[in-house]
Image: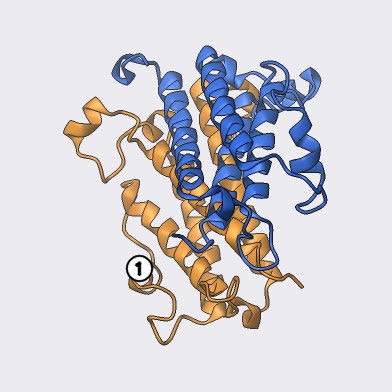
Chain colours: A blue, B orange
Amino acid sequence: MTALTSQTPEAIYLATTLKAWDVWIGRANKFLGSLSDEALFQEIVPGKNRAIYVLGHLLAVNDGMIPQLRLGELTYPELREIFITQPDRAVAELPSASELRAKWADLHSRLNALFSELTPSQWLERHATVSEEDFALEPHRNRLALLLSRTSHVSYHIGQLLLMPRP
Amino acid sequence: MTALTSQTPEAIYLATTLKAWDVWIGRANKFLGSLSDEALFQEIVPGKNRAIYVLGHLLAVNDGMIPQLRLGELTYPELREIFITQPDRAVAELPSASELRAKWADLHSRLNALFSELTPSQWLERHATVSEEDFALEPHRNRLALLLSRTSHVSYHIGQLLLMPRP
């Protein structure tokens, strides 16, 4: 990364925002690393989603950022039905813990590479779910807004996951 | 607010980030409005913090933004001990639900007024817990970073609160 001290204000805005994303993905990584494969299949709290479902949900939602940011196709389109459309336990056979761990690592590497290719100005371009006409009137519906929304979506679910009994 | 379409890139960065804060405070307001005073004293899930403690904690932490952003003194210094230093149930008598609701509304109005006074460039100035020397080397330790961190702190706890049985 270019030294922040030599950057423009918008570059510092962007670097600060990407750092917040990294912090929460780092917390998710740490949580994922702290649970055994067996523990991943435990409920967060009695009667609620299992940890593996929540992590699969974050994986599928974060993968969705790629088309939503207009940066390419979904990496794992098959995960949407399992972890977004359907609730936990509706799908009899979930991906294994090891498959989910590998996809998690691969996706977040891919996202980091894609994010680093966008300039600060490109982050202010529209995201995919707003039309060019609407975006002209509502320029805050930009890629940055999507990144902020997904960062807080990660922290929302990390808050839940950390209610689990820890080893 | 000035029309976003006429704003500089850094102003759009800031407006987008403040909008994300507003979204999560709006969700917290909605949650707070959906619970009776009695329900506020229920545990989120068995054996965990009560909703009133979590909301009091968010109130005290968000109040802390004022000195941390170098914008003034704490509004409710007495809440820090109850809702940050001490865990739930360590303090025998919590503020009443109605007192907490009123302070919540007042604080977030005050924060909005303070936030709106800062220019986009002032948001890139250092926050209070970094020295001027360190900030010269690490310009991402700015007020914006604190806002992003507190936004995700709200969403983290809203994720937990929404595990409560709802009416």
Residue B100 in the image: x percent, y percent?
52, 73
Quadrant where the C terminus of chain A is found in the figure: bottom left
Give the camera-side residue of B21 and B45: B45
Q: Quadrant of residue A30?
A: top left
* In the depicted structure, whether residue B149 falls above or below residue B140: below
In the drawing, does residue A15 fall left or right of residue B166?
Answer: left
Q: Disc 1 marks which amino acid?
A: Arg
Q: Quadrant of residue A49?
A: bottom right
In percent of the image, x 78 and y 31: which residue is there? Answer: A78
In percent of the image, x 47 and y 56: which residue is there? Answer: B110
In the drawing, does residue B110 fall left or right of residue B70?
Answer: right
| Residue under numbered circle 1 | B80
Farthest residue toward the bottom? B92
Dot 1 falls on a residue whose secondary structure is helix
* In the depicted structure, whether residue B117 falls above or below residue A47: above
* Residue A88 appears in view: yes
* Residue A141 appears in view: no
Quadrant where the N terminus of chain A is found in the figure: top left
Q: Quadrant of residue A80?
A: top right
* In the depicted structure, whether residue B117 falls above or below residue B111: above
Give the camera-side residue of B103 and A143: A143
Give the camera-side residue of A162 and B126: A162
Residue B54 in the image: x percent, y percent?
51, 67
